[in-house]
């Protein structure tokens, strides 16, 4: 039987495919902008057919399954929160499960959170019958290999990406064709504060370095100041449009990489349609599962690995909080710790935590103590550089007193006096801090 015959046998309507989701099933949803939006909207439309579904996702896109009216039919269990899921967890209408990003595939495959149904979105099949997971391989591919039932939305707008990104039509149980534009991540607006942070971070990056960046204004601001750098490489859980522009400009060419030479290694992508078109069938990109890309032992094989991440707050010892505001869960640990440790083990590696000095200009993000109830993401033993718009604090190898002094000098000037007061109480030593 040809793959086309197999494909046609498995081709059904969304409503027919969703009949194979049973009450109490755990559904694991394709990640981020590869969320199978049409299937999920149809599942919500048919909510009265279900009781007690658990829907597992990580970085959310539209997340229609997280609505407050759905609690008896389906409940979100998220491994990372965003704008579309944060409120549901705050209202106790959804759950949050902490997990390092690198360990997510094993969480689903080893039995900690076994998947009954994988609901994914893939490209149309190639001439050999293979569909591509496109912009999100991460844990999605592993889940599709271990789930009892695989339901795939085939979308001709999903790029065909290179790497370990393929699933054969024979390994899909139900195929639903539905074409719609991929969800896009708009390019962020970069403020003067973020420009200064970007410039400070860029001063720590050298020709030939291998980079990990997140998404948002700070990573894009860093990239703005790398147009004079040469032979940069990428090994990152995620990249977006900013990397594309430096690749087109020749600054990022992956030629200096000693590991996966001439390939930008990533596990998922978020960006604009221009970016998705750029990665389509582009052999310079190698998309691999997150348990490989984010494994610190793998990361460390890249010489001169530089990771740049952000956070919510830092205390005077250098403890980094990135996923919660007090007891309020804001996001998740993601890959920050994976890359901080991988960079530490890399020959010539560096790790950077970058943030504005204040939250909305009202509260200092450098604090005497972390907020009560907050969870530490990167420990004081792992942290290396903290960067704000006011400068760079190198904490690795510094005593607690030296750390506090360095952090106070890159805090917002309005908050330095009260931080200095705590410093003097703690260390019985007057601090001559910078006044502006």
Image (cartoon, rainbow, N blue to C red):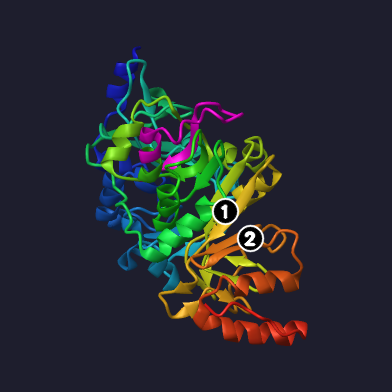
For label 2, the SS is: loop
**Residue 192 position in % (x across, y down):** 37, 64
Which residue in the protein does label 2 denote? 378
Q: Residue 276's quadrant in the figure?
A: top left
Residue range corresponding to the magenta coloring: 245-270
**Residue 390 position in % (x across, y down):** 51, 68
Is 296 magenta? The answer is no
**Residue 423 visible somewhere in the drawing:** yes
**Residue 7 position in % (x across, y down):** 31, 23
Which residue in the protein does label 1 denote? 336
Q: Residue 134's quadrant in the figure?
A: top left
**Residue 196 to residue 14: above or below:** below
**Residue 57 visible somewhere in the drawing:** no
**For this view, does 396 lie left or right of residue 245?**
right
Is 268 magenta? The answer is yes
The residue located at (28%, 58%) in the rendering is 48
Q: Residues within 10 Å of mark 1 (few under 14, many from 20)?
A: many
Mark found first going from the N terminus, 1 or 2:
1
Q: Nearer the viewer, residue 412 or 71?
A: 412
**Residue 435 to residue 294: above or below:** below
**For this view, does 400 lie left or right of residue 278?**
right
Instruction: For the N terminus, give its image quadrant.
Output: top left
Confirm or deny contact between disc 1 and disc 2 (CB under 8 A). Answer: yes
Marker disc for residue 268: none
**Residue 327 to residue 304: above or below:** below
Q: CA distance from mark 1 to mark 2?
A: 8 Å
Q: Nearer the viewer, residue 140 or 173?
A: 140
The residue located at (51%, 76%) in the rendering is 412
């Amino acid at each position: 039987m040809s793959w086309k015959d197999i494909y046609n046998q498995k081709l059904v309507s969304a409503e027919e495919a969703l009949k194979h989701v049973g009450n109490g099933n755990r559904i694991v949803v394709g990640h981020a902008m590869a969320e199978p939006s049409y299937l999920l909207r149809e599942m919500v439309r048919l909510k009265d057919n279900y009781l007690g579904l658990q829907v597992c996702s990580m970085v959310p896109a539209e997340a229609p399954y997280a609505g407050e009216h759905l609690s008896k039919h389906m409940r979100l269990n998220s491994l990372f929160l965003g704008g579309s899921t944060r409120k549901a967890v705050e209202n106790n209408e959804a759950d949050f499960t902490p997990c390092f990003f690198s360990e997510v595939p094993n969480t689903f495959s080893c039995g900690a959170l076994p998947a009954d149904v994988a609901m994914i979105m893939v490209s149309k099949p190639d001439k050999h019958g293979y569909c591509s997971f496109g912009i999100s391989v991460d844990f999605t591919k592993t889940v599709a290999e271990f789930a009892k039932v695989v339901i795939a939305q085939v979308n001709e707008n999903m790029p065909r990406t290179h790497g370990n990104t393929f699933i054969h039509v024979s390994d899909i149980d139900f195929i639903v064709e539905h074409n719609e534009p991929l969800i896009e991540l708009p390019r962020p607006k970069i403020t003067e504060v973020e420009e200064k942070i970007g410039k400070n971070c860029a001063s720590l990056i050298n020709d030939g370095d291998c980079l990990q960046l997140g998404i948002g204004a700070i990573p894009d601001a860093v990239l703005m100041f790398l147009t004079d750098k040469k032979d940069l490489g990428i090994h990152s859980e995620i990249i977006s449009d900013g990397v594309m522009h430096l690749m087109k400009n020749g600054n990022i060419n992956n030629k200096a990489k000693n590991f996966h030479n001439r390939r930008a290694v990533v596990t998922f992508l978020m960006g604009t349609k221009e970016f998705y078109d750029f990665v389509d069938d582009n052999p310079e990109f190698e998309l691999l599962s997150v348990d490989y890309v984010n494994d610190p032992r793998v990361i460390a094989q890249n010489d001169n690995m530089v990771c740049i991440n952000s956070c919510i707050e830092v205390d005077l010892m250098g403890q980094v909080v990135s996923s919660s505001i007090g007891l309020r869960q804001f996001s998740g640990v993601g890959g920050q710790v994976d890359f901080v440790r991988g960079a530490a083990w890399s020959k010539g590696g560096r790790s950077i935590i970058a943030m504005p000095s204040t939250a909305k200009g009202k509260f200092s993000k450098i604090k005497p103590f972390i907020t009560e109830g907050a969870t530490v993401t990167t420990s004081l033993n792992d942290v290396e550089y903290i960067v704000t718009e006011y400068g760079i604090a190198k904490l690795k190898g510094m005593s607690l007193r030296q750390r506090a002094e360095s952090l106070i000098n890159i805090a917002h000037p309005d908050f330095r006096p009260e931080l200095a007061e705590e410093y003097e109480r703690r260390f019985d030593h007057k601090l001559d801090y910078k006044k502006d």
